[in-house]
Amino acid sequence: MASLSSLFTTLPTTTSSRPPSFSKSSRTSPRFKVSCNASSPDDQKNPNLTLLENVDRRNMLLGLGAGLYGAANLTNIGSALAYPITAPDDVSYCVPARVVKKNDPNPPDTSIRGVACCPPASATAPKPYLLPKFSKLRIRPAAHGVDPDSDYLAKYKAAIAAMKALPDDHPHSWKQQGKVHCAYCNGAYNQEMNGRPDLTLQVHGSSLFFPFHRWYLYFYERILGKLINDPTFALPYWNWDNPTGMMLPAMFEQPGTNGDPRKNPLFDPYRNVGHLPPAIIDLQYAAKERGFNCVDQISTNLSSMYGQMVTSATNTDAFFGTDPNPEIDSKAGTIESGCHTAVHIWVGNPRMPNSEDLGNFYSAGYDPVFYAHHSNVDRMWKIWKDLNPRRNKDPTSYDWLNASYVFYDENEELVRVYNKDCVDTRKMGYDYQRSSIPWVKSRPVPRARNSTVAARSFGGVKKAAEKFEVPVKVDKTVKVLVMRPATKRSDEEKAAATEVLFLNGIKYNGEEFFKLDVLVNDVDDGVETTAASSEFAGTFAQVPHVHGKKMFMTSGAQFGITELLEDIEAEDDKYVLVTLVPKAGAEGATVDEIKIELVPIDN
C-alpha cells in the first residue's frame, strides 16, 4: 500500500459566509412567508453550573432564579455489540450514567451498578409483548397544525402534567421515561447473549436506531393515553421536513398559567433561545449559524431531505444503518447521521456544559420536544418505504428481526418486544396525519457539470485503492481520489446495483458533537458546498453519548452516489475526488478506509 503522505493532500477547512446560489428552476419559491429573526444566543443567561445527578435535576427546573442545573458529560460506550441484540431481563441492573463535568479528575466508578439511568426493578421477568387489539387507529397529528385552543392540545398538556406529577420511582413518571433513553443510548445495559455479558448495548449508530425508538415512542404514547383515560391519544410529530413546520412548534413554548411559559407542561428551560420561533431550523446544523436567509435555508433543508431520503438512501443498509456486530463496527443510517442529529443539536442549549437537554443523549428524553422530533424520524421510516416499495425494504436478517428490548407498558408490566413486530405502524395501532413532502421535488443541482476536477487532481492528490496503512486524520479538510468499480453503466446495470461510497472505521470523540461532510468532485472556489448542491454526498454526525467505557467511538457511513454521478456528469470517470470536510468535534478523529463498491439491489 502507498504511504499516507502520498495518498492525501490536507488543507485548511474552506468556508464562506456567503449563502449558496440557487437555480431558479429547481428551488423553492419565496412564497413561504417566514421571518428568520430570533433572539441572539447571547441573550441567554448563563446558568449556574451546579453538579447534580442527571435525573434528579428535574425537580429544580426554573423558579430557582440563577440556580439552573448544569450537567457535564458522561464517560463513553463500548462499540462492540453482540447479536441478536438482547436487553437484559433485569432492567434495574445497569452501569451508572452519573453525569460529571468535562475533564473531571474523579469520574464515576463504573463498577458500581444499579443507579442513575436504571428503571425500577420488577418482581417478575419481562413477558413477551403481544400487540393489543384496537378499534380505532391513533393518528399522530402534525404539530405545526395543532390549534392552540384545541381539545387535543389540552389533552396532551394534561397527559404530560399527569406524568410529571407521578412519584419519581413510578415506572410511568417523567423521570423514568427520560431514563429509558439515557439507559439504552448511553451503554448502561450489558447484553445477555452468546455468552458475552461484557458487551454493552447501544441502539445508535446501527440498524437498531429506527426500531428501538419506534417501540420507545409506542409505549410512551400509550402511557400518556392511559394517564388521561384516552386510548386514542396520539403524539404530535414535528414535521421539520416541511417548510410550514421548520420552526420549533409553538405548543412547546406557549405561555402557561398567568402567562408564564414555565407553567406549560410542554416547556423545557434547556433549549437554545436563539432558535425559538421564528427561527428556521438548519437540517445540516453544525453548532454554528450560517447566516442564510429564510428562502435559502428552507431550500437547503429540502435538498438535504432529498439527499438523505432519495440520493443516498438507495438500499436498506444505507437508510437504516448496518446490523450491529461484535467483530465489525456498524454504520449509521442517513437519517440518523443527518437531520436526526441536526435537530438534536439545534434545539439543545449551547450554554449548558453538554448542550442539555436535546443536545446530549443522556438528557434528551427530558425535553417533550424529543418525542415530537422522533415521531417525525419514525415517520421517515414509513415514508421511505412508500417512496419505492419495490426497492426500499425493511432489514430481513435474523439478527435484526429478533433483536429485543424491555419496556414497562401502560399497565406497568415489564414486557419484551422485538424488531420483527414493529415494521408496520398500522398493526401497532397508529398512523400519521398526512403532510406534504415537498422535498421529493428538491433534487440538488450541481455546482459544475463534467468539471474534470478529479482528472485535474492527479499528481497533487494521489489515488487510494486500498485500506490505509495509517488511519487518516480528518481534523482538516482531506481530499482523496477513489477508484470506481465500473464506468458508463447502463440503466439495466443501475437497476441491478447501486454505486455506494463507503467510509469505514470513522473514529471520533463520543463526548463531543461530531460532524463530517462528504463531497464528491467538489469545486474548490472558496464557497461552502451545501446540501443544495449535487456534489454534497452526505454527512456523518453524532450526538454526544458517552458513559464511561472509553472516549473514542468507531463507526462508519455509506452514501449512494449513482444519482449524484449522473447529476455532475461523472459517470465516465474512472476516479472521483472525495473531499472530507470536518464541521465539528474532529480533533483526533480519523478514517480507516474510503472506497466505492457496487451493491446489488434486492428486487
Image (spheres, rainbow, N blue to C red):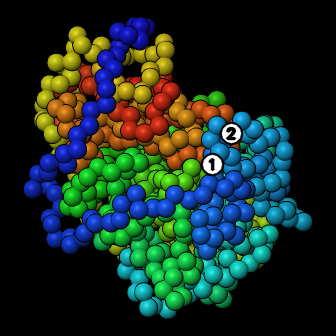
Residue 337 lies, in percent from the top left, at 45, 46
Which disc number belongs to residue 104? 2
Dot 1 or dot 2, earlier in sequence = 1
Residue 481 lies, in percent from the top left, at 29, 20
For the N terminus, which image quadrant?
A: top left
Which disc number belongs to residue 72? 1
Which disc number belongs to residue 12? none
**Left of 25 or right of it: where is 557?**
right
For the image shown, how many numbered marks are present on the structure? 2
Instruction: Check disc 1 and give the amino acid type.
Output: Ala
Which residue lies at the image location 76% right of the left edge and 42% below the top edge? Answer: 108
**Left of 389 or right of it: where is 70?**
right
Q: Is residue 221 above or below residue 83?
A: below
Q: Is residue 395 visible?
A: no
Badge 1 vs badge 2, beta-carbon distance below 8 Å: yes
Instruction: Check disc 2 and give the amino acid type.
Output: Asp
Q: Is residue 289 visible?
A: yes
Q: Residues within 10 Å of mark 2 (few under 14, many from 20)?
A: few
Nearer to me, 494 or 90:
90
Nearer to me, 323 or 187:
187
Residue 409 lies, in percent from the top left, at 72, 71
Local secondary structure at mark 2: loop
Which residue lies at the image location 53% right of the left edge and 30% below the top edge? Answer: 507
CA distance separating discs 1 and 2: 9 Å
Q: Residue furthest front?
A: 66
Q: Residue furthest right?
A: 123
